[in-house]
């Protein structure tokens, strides 16, 4: 008998038929003799609907009250699932984030997990109950409800798996696993049998939306074995783990991130400390910086371009303008009509020529590159947003259709 943590996203729970289908998946795992904990997201579109209801009343609601509101979506999901499993005659209990002891910090809307007291979970499992956990939520030191941000239910599932020392954490989605690119957009995208934590973290960070990067980072830190599989088709998925059994091809996947804006500061003083001053004020505002490009100095000045998420663009510009005298630059410009396209693969480290193949594919497709960023297992380029899907298709074809 093993202990399995399952996680189901909102698309799998969209209607009564979906809930019943998921109930049978949970029931099957339980009937095989496993202890089962299932973490559920809110039903499809529920969170967006709740946000709209709030904004009808107040365009700028407080983050605390939004967390109270948004957490109800997951609570509805676990209650409905418990009702469905009760109909099947199975012992089941639904629990909220605070009931399982999910303790977080007080960053409402994007809280970080500080610890998980698993006593209630263990007690219910000892009674051979199926435990349904409301994902995406926790409680802070003030006993206020908090939410974990986008992909928070993935993170909840991994945290539960860590606390219970689970044998496997299964993430059910509407696709059959991790693909070399989005199978809904890229012809010839292939499902991977296995992928390393590092590769999955990069793909998730770079725009692949199957798993949230925070959940994979936690899984890597504690050695949680994960499987990404479909809730619609009963087929093996993709295993995410530390080391894969087979030698990798050059790359594991191609990802696109359209949530990108480029900011350029022109005429920065060419002297020590200027870059530090600029990025310090942005860091103090918790604005994350991605690709950075500095030009060759001229006339004792430099130009620096960097990327942020589109949602941070206006705030970043505002902060930079407020600190213009401290930083010292001539002008600032922005462009949010861009996208980041990346290739990821542990095999890149031992495969010379990956960059050349990537750039050749973009050249053949007549796509201009604005910025480039590299690491040991990824290469990212910034392109015009209108060229993003063509870029992904061209790069994917170069590596996987040859």
Image (cartoon, rainbow, N blue to C red):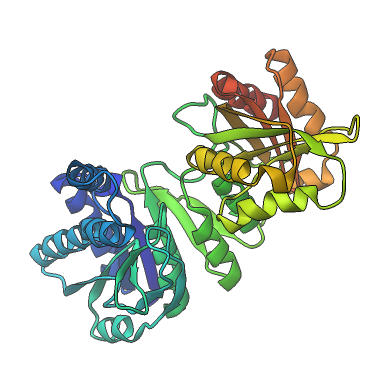
User: Residue at the location (38% across, 83% down)?
Assistant: 117
Left or right: 248 in relation to 8: right
Q: Residue furthest front?
A: 325
Q: Quadrant of the N terminus?
A: bottom left
Q: Quadrant of the C terminus?
A: top right
Is the residue 185 above or below the residue 128 in the image? Answer: above
Is the residue 127 above or below the residue 218 in the image? Answer: below
User: Residue at the location (23% across, 64% down)?
Assistant: 27
**Any part of residue 247 in sight:** no
* Residue 343 spot, x, y in % from top left: 67, 37
Q: Nearer the viewer, residue 197 or 307?
A: 307
Is the residue 44 above or below the residue 69 in the image? Answer: above
* Residue 235 spot, x, y in % from top left: 40, 47
Left or right: 152 in relation to 221: left
**Any part of residue 79 in sight:** yes
User: Residue at the location (67% across, 42% down)?
Assistant: 324
């Amino acid at each position: 008998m093993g202990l399995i943590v399952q996680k189901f996203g909102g698309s799998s729970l969209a209607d009564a038929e979906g809930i019943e289908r998921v109930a049978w998946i949970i029931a099957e795992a339980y009937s095989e003799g496993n202890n089962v904990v299932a973490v559920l997201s809110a039903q499809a579109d529920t969170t967006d609907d709740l946000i709209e209801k709030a904004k009808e009343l107040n365009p700028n609601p407080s983050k605390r009250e939004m967390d109270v509101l948004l957490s109800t979506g997951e609570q509805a999901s676990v209650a409905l699932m418990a009702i469905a499993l009760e109909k099947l005659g199975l012992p089941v209990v639904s629990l909220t984030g605070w009931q399982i002891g999910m303790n977080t910090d007080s960053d409402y809307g994007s809280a970080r997990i500080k610890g998980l007291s698993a006593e209630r979970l263990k007690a219910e499992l000892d009674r051979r109950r199926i435990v349904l956990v409301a994902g995406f939520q926790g409680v802070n030191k003030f006993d206020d409800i908090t939410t974990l941000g986008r992909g928070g239910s993935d993170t909840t599932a991994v945290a539960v798996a860590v606390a219970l020392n689970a044998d496997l954490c299964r993430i059910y989605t509407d696709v059959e696993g991790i693909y070399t690119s989005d199978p809904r957009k890229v012809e010839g995208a292939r499902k991977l049998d296995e992928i390393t934590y590092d590769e999955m973290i990069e793909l998730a960070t770079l725009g692949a939306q199957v798993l949230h990067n925070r959940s994979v980072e936690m899984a890597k830190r504690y050695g949680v074995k994960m499987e990404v599989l479909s809730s619609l088709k009963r087929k093996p998925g993709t295993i995410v783990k530390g080391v894969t059994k087979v030698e990798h091809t050059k790359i594991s996947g191609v990802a696109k991130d359209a949530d990108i804006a480029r900011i350029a500061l022109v005429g920065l003083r060419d002297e020590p400390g200027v870059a530090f001053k600029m990025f310090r004020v942005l860091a103090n505002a918790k604005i994350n910086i991605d690709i950075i490009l500095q030009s060759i100095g001229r006339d004792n000045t430099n130009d620096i371009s960097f990327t942020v998420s589109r949602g941070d663009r206006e705030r970043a510009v505002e902060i930079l303008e407020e600190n213009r005298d401290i930083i010292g630059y001539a002008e600032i410009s922005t462009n949010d009509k861009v996208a980041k396209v990346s290739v990821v693969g542990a095999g890149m480290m031992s495969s010379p020529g990956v960059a050349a193949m990537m750039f050749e594919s973009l050249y053949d497709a007549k796509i201009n590159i604005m910025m480039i960023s590299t690491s040991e297992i990824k290469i990212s380029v910034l392109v015009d947003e209108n060229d993003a899907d063509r870029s992904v298709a061209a790069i994917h074809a170069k590596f996987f259709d040859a």
